[in-house]
């Protein structure tokens, strides 16, 4: 006689003919029980970063100060990687995944803030190079281009210039001394199809657009949109292999520009506000389109899109006809744009857009509608975010863009709101920091939908 029974841990035991077959799901295969506490800390976890399925982050356990931690989503698998500064905090920052290796800046108490790397083990967490032997190297703008890390840094000889690293001391070097008289201050390092774009500061004429292939000879100025003044190049954004940015040529004000890396191919896309300047911001890539916020004067600051042509650079929708729509949190989720905005009547809500006026609408919930959404992140095609509603303060929500698929995931802190932040997808598991009313906002949480 055969029988089937379900036992603890969702194990399935099949009894029959003297045969017992036990199936135990993988450690990560949790039942749909909602978010769970991974570990509480003394200070809020920050810089949550996915490196090949492992979560790296910065936290303070109350004993070691602010140090580098890692987690597999279980309490037992959440550990400090290394106490880099044993007598204080190493304060790791700029955590960046470079082909499966974590690069970051940290201070070991001896060398100042310098370049480090980690494979998640104590032995494999090491300082790569003391770039500035007489002080801080001031590392910033960590960017992965074809497995090479590019950063802005200074050593004892040069001001802030462009550096590169392959993770070895010898392979960590100055790319080019662009401004020998005081540093070029590289900013907004951006990877576009294996070419690094960035801005430099020319003391005479302000911001210029540059590019680099990692060699001194291949590190060159692309174009100075305004040769007689400051071009004010900002918000470098890769959209399907084309660089978009905000700049001024001294005649048209701050408008939308694009570049293919050549001087002739670096042009203003459209003069959106001929009587002033549109100041495009929040540049966000969604498929082959660029979405952004701009002011054409007639509609104030609203949602726009561009395909790179003047004709294809158009207002998507005047969300708030009586004022600014206060766009924020533009997020690409599998070819759909989600964002927060106000129509001037209902407050700040979650919106979505397919790039058409009709397809740009507020996302309603079945029982309530989320307000003031922030910290948007996608996991397996579902959007997760922090929001409030009529009966709850800020909690974890999810949405697939439909009313039925938009709801609060869990009321983690019924008395005051859990205020989730730092939402990060690690191989289908959502990690975030939240306040459950017991551990404060210094707790790491996880949820596997």
Image (cartoon, rainbow, N blue to C red):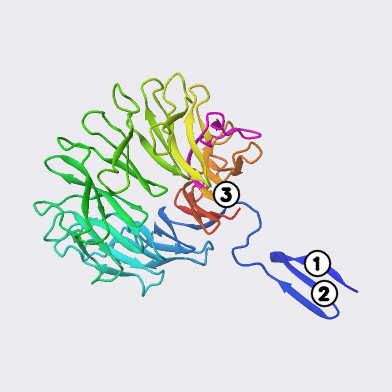
Magenta stretch containing residue 354, yes or no? Answer: yes
Give the numbered dot on residue 17. none
Residue 177: give x, y in percent of width and height: 15, 57
Residue 89 appears anywhere in the view: no
Q: Looking at the rendered structure, which numbered label has been put on residue 5? A: 1
Mark 3 element type: loop
> Would you name the residue on which mark 3 appears?
381
Residue 110 at x, y percent in the picture: 21, 66
Q: Could you tell which of marks 3 and 1 lies nearer the N-terminus?
A: 1
Stretch in magenta: 353-377
Q: Nearer the viewer, residue 178 or 439?
A: 178
Assess whether residue 100 is covered by the magenta stretch: no
Tell me the residue at 28%/59% (across/down): 150
In the rendered image, which residue does mark 2 sit on?
Answer: 15
> Which is more N-terminal, label 2 or label 3?
2
User: 188 or 194: nearer the eye?
Assistant: 194
Report the predominant secondary structure element of the magenta stretch: loop
Q: Which of 36 and 126 is in front in this view?
A: 126
Q: Say which residue appears at 22% left-offset and 50% top-offset.
A: 186
CB within 8 Å, label 1 to label 2: yes
Determine the secondary structure under disc 1: strand
Give the quadrant of the N terminus.
bottom right
What is the CA distance from the residue labelled 3 to the residue labelled 1?
34 Å
Q: Marks 3 and 2, how far apart in space? A: 39 Å
């Amino acid at each position: 006689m055969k029988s089937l029974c379900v036992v603890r841990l969702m194990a399935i035991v099949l009894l029959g003919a003297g045969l017992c077959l036990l199936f135990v799901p993988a450690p990560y295969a949790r039942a749909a029980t909602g978010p769970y506490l991974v570990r509480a800390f003394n200070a809020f976890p920050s810089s949550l970063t996915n490196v090949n399925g492992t979560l790296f982050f910065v936290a303070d356990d109350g004993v070691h100060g602010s140090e580098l931690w890692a987690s597999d989503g279980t309490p037992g698998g959440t550990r400090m990687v290394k106490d880099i500064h044993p007598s204080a905090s190493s304060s790791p920052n700029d955590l960046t995944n470079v082909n499966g290796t974590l690069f970051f800046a940290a201070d070991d108490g001896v060398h100042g803030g310098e370049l480090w790397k980690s494979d998640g083990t104590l032995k494999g967490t090491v300082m790569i190079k003391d770039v500035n032997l007489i002080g801080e190297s001031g590392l910033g703008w960590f960017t992965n281009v074809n497995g090479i890390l590019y950063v802005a840094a200074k050593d004892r000889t040069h001001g802030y210039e462009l550096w590169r690293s392959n993770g070895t001391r010898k392979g960590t070097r100055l790319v080019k001394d662009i401004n020998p008289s005081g540093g070029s201050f590289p900013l907004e390092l951006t990877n576009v199809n294996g070419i690094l774009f960035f801005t430099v500061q020319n003391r005479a004429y302000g911001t210029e657009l540059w590019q680099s292939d990692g060699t001194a000879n291949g590190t060159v100025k692309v174009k100075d949109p305004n040769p007689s003044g400051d071009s004010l190049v900002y918000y470098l954004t890769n959209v399907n292999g084309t660089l978009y940015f905000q700049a001024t040529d001294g005649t048209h004000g701050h408008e939308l520009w694009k570049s293919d890396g050549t001087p002739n191919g670096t042009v203003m896309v459209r003069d959106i506000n001929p009587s002033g300047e549109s100041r495009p911001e929040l540049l966000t890539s969604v498929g082959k389109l660029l979405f952004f916020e701009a002011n054409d004067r007639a509609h104030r600051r609203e949602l726009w899109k561009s395909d790179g042509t003047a004709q294809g650079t158009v207002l998507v929708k005047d969300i708030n006809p009586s004022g600014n729509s206060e766009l924020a949190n533009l997020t690409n989720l599998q070819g759909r744009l989600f964002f927060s905005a106000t129509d001037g009547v209902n407050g700040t809500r979650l919106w979505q857009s397919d790039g058409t006026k009709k397809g740009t609408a507020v996302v309603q919930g079945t029982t309530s509608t989320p307000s003031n959404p922030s910290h948007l992140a996608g996991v397996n095609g579902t959007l997760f975010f922090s929001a409030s509603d009529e009966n709850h303060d800020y909690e974890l929500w999810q949405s697939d863009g439909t009313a039925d698929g938009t709801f609060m995931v869990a009321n983690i802190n019924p008395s005051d709101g859990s205020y989730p932040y730092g939402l990060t997808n690690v191989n289908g598991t959502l990690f975030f920091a939240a306040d459950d009313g017991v551990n404060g906002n210094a707790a790491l949480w996880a949820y596997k939908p």
